[in-house]
Structure formats: structure tokens, C-alpha cells
Amino acid sequence: MRILVTGGAGFLGSHLCDRLIGQGHDVICLDNFFTGRKANIQHLVGNPRFELVRHDIIDAFKFEVDRIYNLACPASPPHYQYNPIKTMKTSVMGSINCLGLAKRVKARVFQASTSEVYGDPAVHPQQESYWGNVNPIGLRSCYDEGKRCAETLFFDYHREHGVDIRVIRIFNTYGPRMLADDGRVVSNFIVQALQGNDLTVYGDGSQTRSFCFVDDLVEGFLRFMEQEKCVGPMNLGNPGEFTMLQLAELVLKKVGGKSRITHKPLPSDDPKQRRPDITLAKETLGWEPQIPLEAGLEKTISYFREALAK
Ligand code: NAD
Ligand code: UDP
């Protein structure tokens, strides 16, 4: 198949491009390089089945493709809050452009939605049927509401125009190729520990997240895209739940060294708890994460050790 991956030079997108090329598909990677890097896909450049296009998804584009994976959107809070109006445009206008293209060329289109659509959830763990608890006017709203609007657009194009959609809700995912200055918690803690700096736990560190290793997530993407039973929304993530203090202690144990834990103010609207109910993914895809947090952290620590030494 010919497959378009928007945001293909980013953390998740570049791993997805690797898998799709490995499966023998032709891949067009579209990216504006806001948080993506050429280094993430450098090894694919020159492969006759890989094309790289510098483009912003808020502007229209046209490719003859069979599949569209829409991943373009900054995912880390400091990056998506850097230019919140642009973040909203990326989710909304980018989705409209992907859906319009899918409609025209009859492609199947996949949306990388997020656990952030649940906001600061009042229901725990989160099932797909939960509508969420989201502040519409806060600092995180450009991302949360942008992704919620994108979901609405996907389901309206599906109902109104019969577009073949797949909507996945991704819970915190980590692994090699995250940016060292990405701002998300796993990369922050690992880089801080490797550089001998103190680990910055925001608030008292009792808030929880569930962390999925990138290889597990991308396997879920591929299975979800190529099945016919369910258009979503479907949660994908690792149900293991940890407080940020537990994560910091685990990273310190794995990296060693002299770093300690320091506390910084909790950002506004920071969700207190998050854990996916993955029953739907298990039943529909036969999928569940294979890589526990400790093993995934070891791989990610090795990656950053090498990357920081360059
Ligand atoms: P990332 O920031 O590494 O990747 C995003 C990519 O999109 C980057 O390459 C960036 O340059 C590109 N991009 C951003 N705006 C664009 C635009 N207007 N036009 C073209 N390209 C643009 O983040 P990631 O972790 O790889 O996330 C990928 C997708 O998955 C995002 O849509 C994100 O919202 C979603 N997601 C990720 C996680 C996670 O934990 N990693 C969780 C939930 C949802
Ligand atoms: N966090 C932290 N220290 C950091 C970065 C983040 O304690 O250096 C916390 C943050 O407040 C949140 C959790 O870790 O409670 C996950 O943050 P991240 O930005 O990775 O993802 P999100 O909040 O979008 O789930």
C-alpha cells in the first residue's frame, strides 16, 4: 500500500514509518519539523519506498494514498503551549485536510487522539465510554479541546460521508527518539539523571500516569488500522499505573549517580490520575503491552546515554 504518515519525523511517527517500510509499504512522511527531526528518519532517506515532504498540515495537500495516519501535532505540554492557537489549528484544520483527502481518494484515515480527551478524569480507570472532564479555557485546552474537536470531525466525516476512520486514544508513551528537551516526564527524568541534575517532580508527585513503551504502541496502531470490526475510539496504553515519585525513584535506581528528587510547582489542570481500561483493545485486536516499565526504561536510558554523548 501507499501510506501517508503526518508527523512522521516525530517520536511516534518515525517508529511507525520504520514498521511500515519493514512491512514492504511505500511511505510518504509529511512533517513541518516543529518537534520532529530529520535525524529520526535519516536512515530511511534514500530508500526508494520512502519519501519525505516538508509541509504543514494546516495547508491543503494531495497524495494518492490507501492509508493516512494523522500524527501531526506537538504532544508535550511545553511544546503544545508554546503557540496554542497553532496547536488548535493543527488538530482542527489538519484533521479536516486529512479527512478531505481520505474522502477524495477513498483512503482509510487514522487519528492519533489522546487520553487528554478525558481531562482530569472523574472515572478511573478510563473506559472509552467516559466523556471526560476537560477545562475548555485553560492552558492545556488548546491540545485537549483540539483533539476532542478532531474526534468530532472524524466521526462526522464517517457518518456524513462514509469516510473509513480509525480513532485511537493514546496514553503516555515513551521510548527512544523522544527529544532530550521534550519536556515530558520520562525524558526529563532520564536526561536529568544522566546529567547528574536533580529530578524535577511537579507537585507532591502523587499524581499517576500509565506508561507504554513505543514498540508496544506501534504494534497496536498497525493491528487497529488493519481490522474491520471497530472504528474506535479505542484506548491504547499500558495499564500499569505509577505515581511520578515512583517513576523518579525507578529512574534514579536504573541510572545510578548522585541525583536527588526536587519538587517544582504543579502545572495548572495537571490530571491527578490516569490509567487506560484496555479491554476493548484486548478483545478486538488481541493486543496488550509486552514491555514492562523497567525494561522499557532500560532501553530508553541506553538511547539517551548514547544520544547525550554525541
Ligand atoms: P512529537 O512531537 O514527537 O511528534 C509530532 C510530529 O508532528 C513532529 O514531527 C512535528 O514536527 C509534527 N508536526 C507538528 N505540527 C505539525 C503541523 N502543523 N504540520 C506538520 N507536522 C506537524 O510527538 P509524538 O509523541 O510522536 O506524538 C505523535 C502524535 O501522537 C501526536 O498527534 C500526539 O498528540 C499523539 N499522542 C502522543 C502521545 C505520547 O505519549 N507520545 C500520547 C497521546 C497522543
Ligand atoms: N512531570 C513531572 N516532572 C517533569 C515533567 C512532568 O513531575 O519534569 C509530571 C507532570 O506534572 C504530570 C506527569 O509528570 O503530572 C506527566 O507529564 P507529561 O508532561 O509527561 O504528560 P501529561 O501531563 O501530558 O500526561
Image: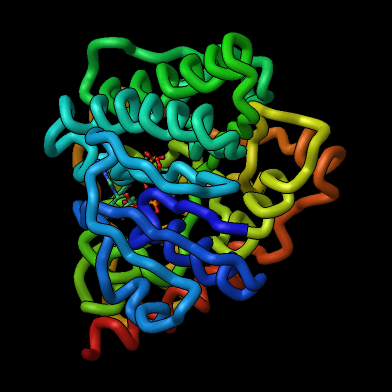
Give residue 236's position: percent from left, percent from top.
64, 42
Position above or below: 46 against 135? below
Query: Which residue is at a point 23% across and 35% down the rendered structure image?
Result: 59
Tell me: 161 left or right of 191.
right
Using the image as rendered, state which of residue 85 and residue 194 is in the foreground: 85
Horizontal placement of 158 versus 190: left or right?
right
Percent coordinates x, y for residue 117 in the rendering: 47, 23
Quadrant in the picture for residue 46: bottom left
Instruction: Indicate the quadrant of ligand 2 in the picture.
Output: top left
Position of the N terminus, as image quadrant, is bottom right
* Residue 185 shows in the view: no
Where does the image place residue 14, in percent across and percent down from the top left? Answer: 43, 65
User: Quarter-wise, where is residue 138 in the image?
Assistant: top left
Look at the image and name its color scheme.
rainbow
Relative image position of residue 21 (x, y in whole percent)? 56, 71
> If the image is split into quadrants, where does the C terminus sit?
bottom left
